Amino acid sequence: MFALIVNPSSGRGRATSLFQQVEERLIQHDLAYTTLLSDSKDASIEFLKRLLDDYRLTAIIIIGGDGTAGSVVQVASNYAIPLAILPAGSGNDAARAFNLTYDPNVFVQKLIHLSTQQVDLLSVNGKKGITIAAAGVDAEIGEAANHSFYKSFLNKFGIGGVAYPIAAIHTLCTFTPFEVRLSIDNTPHAWHRTWLIAAGNTPSYGGGLRVCPEALPNDGVLHITVAHSASRTSLLLRLFPKLLQGNLIHSPSISYLTGTAITLQANRNILLILDGEPIHSPQFTICIEAGGLKLVNSSE
């Protein structure tokens, strides 16, 4: 039995269209499935828990964006159920990192053969995610973009990713940097003027913003980017544009670190975004769970 979760609001209705095509092919191949159409994380989790009471699930199928996939990784990981993602969001950073197909016919053929790979997961204060845990100004940018009036407008033209640079300009002009004590595998670090901290399992978020350019989802390591010490003008006009380009930045205000476990203590409540889910806290524990998820191979 396949559990199929479709976010009807993903991709300007593209998810619904893809679902119809996938459903036709599942019926053609006589594959048993049951479907939930919802954009609610709670509804998705309850749907899966009810199914697990009665069935042994072959795989969880997601048709939607990174947030939809992120909403079920905890269940998929805890029960060792393969996760299959057919990308239909505006960002699709997981699809980019794992080279997933966008073709529903190829996707169903991959489901039939069900080849999987073990990939790493992030764990943030016990919550699991698949892409990047971003705290500080980058999280505020993501939150501002996702709730902006212009993102839905830009999505209509297939350029929803442009919402992030627009939100970045406004947020960088108003955000107040914070003090932080960071411990990475018990090695301490501290900065008095911290703009962002990103712990990446994959390189990008926000529709291709490569804030952790060297991150790999199967190396058992967190790739950490910290922007600190810079003036607002320098961050806005020099450093952030370079971050958007996705290359390593050689600057005393950008630190690249690696490790398997982080504790983060800020001097105030800050926002962290994990796969689109906001978490507010002054303290975070972030670690990598090596091989924590079975992902269905669906590259073409």
Image (cartoon, rainbow, N blue to C red):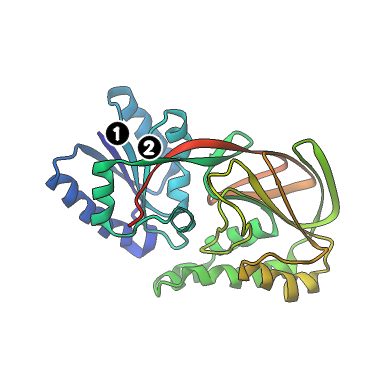
* Residue that lies at the very extreme toward the top in this rendered image: 53
Q: Position of residue 254 (x, y in %)?
A: 77, 61
| Residue 231 falls in image quadrant | bottom right
Labelled pair 1, 2 in contact (Cβ < 8 Å): yes
Q: How many marks?
A: 2
Q: Which mark is residue 200?
A: none
Secondary structure beneath dot 1 equals: loop
Please give the residue where the numbered disc 1 appears in the rendered image.
58
Image height check: is 18 above or below 222? Answer: below
Question: Where does the N terminus fall, quadrant-wise?
Answer: top left
**Residue 80: in sight, yes or no?**
yes
How far apart, in angstroms, are the residues tagged by discs 1 and 2? Answer: 7 Å
Amino acid identity at mark 2: Pro
| Residue 213 falls in image quadrant | bottom right
Q: Residues within 10 Å of mark 1 (few under 14, many from 20)?
A: some
Question: Where does the C terminus fall, quadrant-wise?
Answer: bottom left
- 1 horizontally vs 192: left or right: left
Please give the residue where the numbered disc 2 appears in the rendered image.
82
Amino acid identity at mark 1: Thr
- 112 horizontally vs 131: left or right: left
Foreground pick, 197 / 43: 197
**Residue 147: in sight, yes or no?**
no
Q: Position of residue 206 (x, y in %)?
A: 54, 61
| Residue 105 falls in image quadrant | bottom left
Q: Position of residue 95 (x, y in %)?
A: 43, 56
Foreground pick, 300 / 264: 300
Q: Position of residue 250 (x, y in %)?
A: 76, 66
Query: Which residue corresponds to the image point at 24% horizontal and 38% vertical from the top-left?
Result: 34
